[in-house]
Image: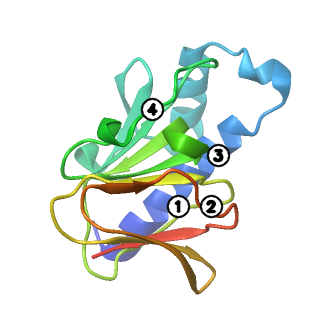
Amino acid sequence: MTRLSFALLGMTVLAAALALSATPANAADEPLQLRVDAVIAEFGGTQTAANEVSWDDGAVVLTLTADGAQPLAVGTCPSGAFCAFDGVSYTGNKLTFFSCTTGNSVAALSSVRSLANSRSSGTVRAYDGWATVATLAPNTGAPSVAAGTDKLNCS
C-alpha cells in the first residue's frame, strides 16, 4: 500500500471512529456489534475481535469501547505501535497504527484528545493545521491534546 493510500485509510478509519463516538445519545446505547457492522459497511475492513476492525492486514486497527468503559493507560497501546484516542486520558475509541514511514502523515480528525507512542524509537507529532501541538518521544503519551488536532505524523 502506498504512503498516500495508507494516509487516506488512516483518515477514513479515524473519521469513522469519531463519527461513531459523536452520535446522538440514544445511539450510544447501540450494541457494540451494530457499531462494528456500521464501520465495516461504510469503510470496509475485517472484524478481528468483538470490538475491533482492522485494515491492511492489521496495519491499522480500530478498537471501539462500550459506554462506561474504564479509562485506558498508555500501556494499552501495543508495543511497536502508536495510538490515538477520542477521549482524554486514553479513553474512548482507540485507533492503533502499527506501520510508520518517514513523512507518512495520517489524519486525526476532529476530536482526537489523547495519544500514545509505544514504539521503542522514533517520535509521533500531533498537528493542528501546520502547528505542532504535541511531540511524543518513544514510550510516552499525551493524556490531553488540543481539540483541534487534525493529523499525526511519525518518524
* 2 or 3: tag closer to the N-terminus: 3
Give the residue at mark 3.
18
User: Where is 148 relative to 4, above or below?
Assistant: above
Q: Which is in the foreground here, disc 1 or disc 2?
A: 2
Density class for disc 1 (Cα within 10 Å; few <14, some 14-19, many ≥20) is: many
Give the mark, 4 or 2, whose residue is nearer the N terminus: 4
Residue ID for mark 1: 11
Q: Earlier in the sequence, mark 3 or mark 1?
A: 1
Disc 1 marks a residue whose amino acid type is Met
- Picture layout, residue 71 above or below residue 18: above
Circles 4 and 2 in contact, beta carbons < 8 Å:
no
- Which residue lies under the disc numbered 2? 109
Real-space CA distance between mark 1 and mark 2, rounded to the nearest whole angstrom? 7 Å
Residue contact at pointers 3 and 1, CB within 8 angstroms: no
The x and y percentages for residue 131 are 59, 85
Where is 68 relative to 80, above or below?
above
Within 10 Å of disc 3 (Cα), the crowding (few <14, some 14-19, many 20+) is many
Q: Few, some or many C-alpha atoms within 10 Å of disc 4 (few <14, some 14-19, many ≥20)?
A: some
Q: Which residue is mark 4?
A: 72
* Callout 3: SS: helix
Image marks 1 and 2: residues in contact by CB distance under 8 Å: yes
CA–CA distance in space, label 4 to label 2: 20 Å
- Whether pointer 2 and pointer 3 mark residues with C-beta atoms closer than 8 Å, the reply is yes
Q: Secondary structure at mark 1?
A: helix
First reached walking from the N terminus: tag 1 or tag 2: 1
Q: CA distance from mark 2 to mark 3?
A: 8 Å
